[in-house]
Image (spheres, helix red, strand yellow):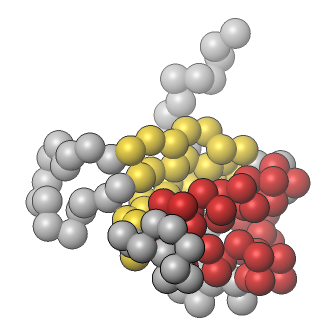
Amino acid sequence: MGVDLLNVEGLNEVDREAPVVMVNLMRFRKRSLDGNGSGWDAYLRYSALTVPMIRARGGTLLWTGEAKAVALGAEAGNQWDYLALVYYPSVAAFIDMMTSADYETLCDPHRRNGCEEHVIICTKEAYSKFKGQG
């Protein structure tokens, strides 16, 4: 499996054919574990390989940004460097990508080298300002 921390059991409780947005929270290493630049540099290598895999499965990168401050809640454990919102047409598409041989061999090493911590939260839409907008 591409990611040993992939919560397949939890994802199996989500409608596998429904669209989802994955909220990615990342904390980068100062130096990439492979010695090739910073954690951010390794993450950029990861992104360059992963975004085409997302698109090939009908997904898209919706938004990315730097985390600046904890605005509400405990700061301890909630300092993140970067966030990304990634749309997938289904949970099955996400699992297909994450468990593919290409992800495991080409992408995941860069993610591991660059990220001290990487949490992905699977979300189901409850409201969207974008619906009905023309």
- 71 vs 134, left or right, is left
Q: Looking at the rendering, which quadrant does residue 26 occupy? A: bottom left
Q: Residue extending furthest top? A: 134
Number of dots carrying numbers: 0
The residue positioned 65% from the left and 44% from the top of the image is 61
Q: Quadrant of the C terminus?
A: top right
Foreground residue among 37 and 92: 37
Foreground residue among 35 and 119: 35
Q: Position of residue 68 (x, y in %)?
A: 26, 44
The residue positioned 65% from the left and 62% from the top of the image is 45
The residue positioned 56% from the left and 73% from the top of the image is 36
Foreground residue among 105 and 130: 105
* Res. 119 in view: no
Q: Looking at the rendering, which quadrant does residue 98 occupy? A: bottom right
Q: Position of residue 74 (x, y in %)?
A: 12, 60
Q: Is residue 102 above or below residue 72?
A: below
Q: Position of residue 122 (x, y in %)?
A: 54, 61
Q: Position of residue 27 (x, y in %)?
A: 37, 65
* Res. 55 in view: yes
Foreground residue among 48 and 69: 48
Q: Is residue 100 above or below residue 82?
A: below
Q: Is residue 46 above or below residue 123?
A: below
Q: Looking at the rendering, which quadrant does residue 57 occupy? A: bottom right
The residue positioned 83% from the left and 83% from the top of the image is 101
- 43 vs 132, left or right, is left
- 78 vs 95, left or right, is left
- 72 vs 93, left or right, is left
Q: Residue extending furthest front? A: 36
Q: Quadrant of the N terminus?
A: bottom right
